[in-house]
Image: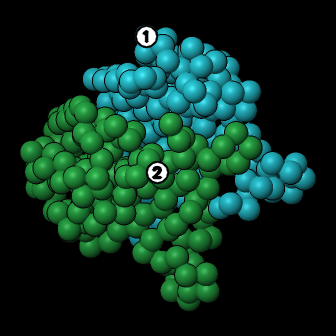
Chain colours: A green, B cyan
């Protein structure tokens, strides 16, 4: 089986704290994201922390999806890791729509490329334009 | 709770195919890695694919650990995602020792920094020296 995979890391800020503490709503969002990405969910485990916050992990045929939430900060960290024909970008759209962040960003890392090639940051959003003059974009590129 | 987290992405090439298909050995390695990283395992789920390959996900108090293996390629992809006082670098050392890759690399991403700061690639190994002349290192930096 082809080892090449895309691992999309997603940061969501300014989400509704109540939603980020709702295990069932988060589960629904992640399952809907999996369906949109055309991946096959094999197992899932959700855990609610005391006093708040949720972790959800989905084993999929194509690797994994994960979500971690900090309701008190309105922040969630989501990963879509897919080998094969999975489409993590579609999962991103679902989760953005469901969690409605005021600010978000993503980074996609190419993994499992081959023994003589390195991991590769292939895409950053919202801005990926080489000469973009947006200050937040410049900050983002300066970080890598 | 502090949202700041370190997410270490690890690629391992040239591992023993038998070991990469041994669910129990991989589970032991990941649990040992969790202990070394000083994180608390809450749940775990391991899945063996047909005809080969294993996915393992650990929910920890500090976020998650994951492993995906492709025995036929001698390749494994491992993630150590920790908030709080977890030490993903120690987990890396355990998994490297257990899986004995002929080549490996890692990238650490700073996440959950704050609403006005972006994800940050904070560290790449094996080489992180700005003016290093090693060709594989140059290739690695050219990718980001």
Identified at 81% across, 48% down, the residue is B136
Label 2: element kind: strand
Identified at 44% across, 39% down, the residue is B81
Identified at 61% across, 81% down, the residue is A130
Label 1: element kind: helix
Q: Is residue B136 left or right of residue B95?
A: right
Depth check: give the residue in front, A132 or B18. Answer: B18
Say which residue label 2 marks: A7
Residue A136 percent location from the top left of the image: 49, 78
Q: What chain does badge 1 belong to?
A: B
Q: Residue furthest right?
A: B133
Q: Is residue B45 visible?
A: yes
Residue B92 percent location from the top left of the image: 59, 29
Depth check: give the residue in front, B21 or B84. Answer: B21
Q: Which mark is residue B24?
A: 1
Residue B143 percent location from the top left of the image: 68, 60
């Amino acid at each position: 089986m082809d080892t090449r995979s895309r691992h999309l890391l997603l940061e969501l800020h300014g989400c509704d704290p109540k939603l980020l503490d709702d295990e069932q709503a988060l589960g629904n969002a992640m399952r809907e994201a999996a369906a949109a990405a055309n991946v096959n969910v094999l197992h899932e485990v959700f855990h609610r922390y005391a006093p708040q916050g949720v972790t959800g992990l989905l084993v999929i045929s194509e690797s994994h999806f994960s979500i971690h939430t900090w309701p008190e900060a309105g922040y969630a960290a989501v990963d879509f890791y897919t080998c094969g024909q999975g489409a993590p970008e579609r999962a991103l759209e679902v989760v953005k729509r469901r969690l409605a962040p005021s600010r978000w960003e993503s980074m996609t890392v190419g993994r499992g490329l081959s023994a003589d090639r390195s991991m590769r940051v292939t895409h950053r959003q919202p801005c990926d334009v080489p000469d973009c003059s947006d200050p937040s974009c410049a900050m983002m590129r300066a970080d890598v």
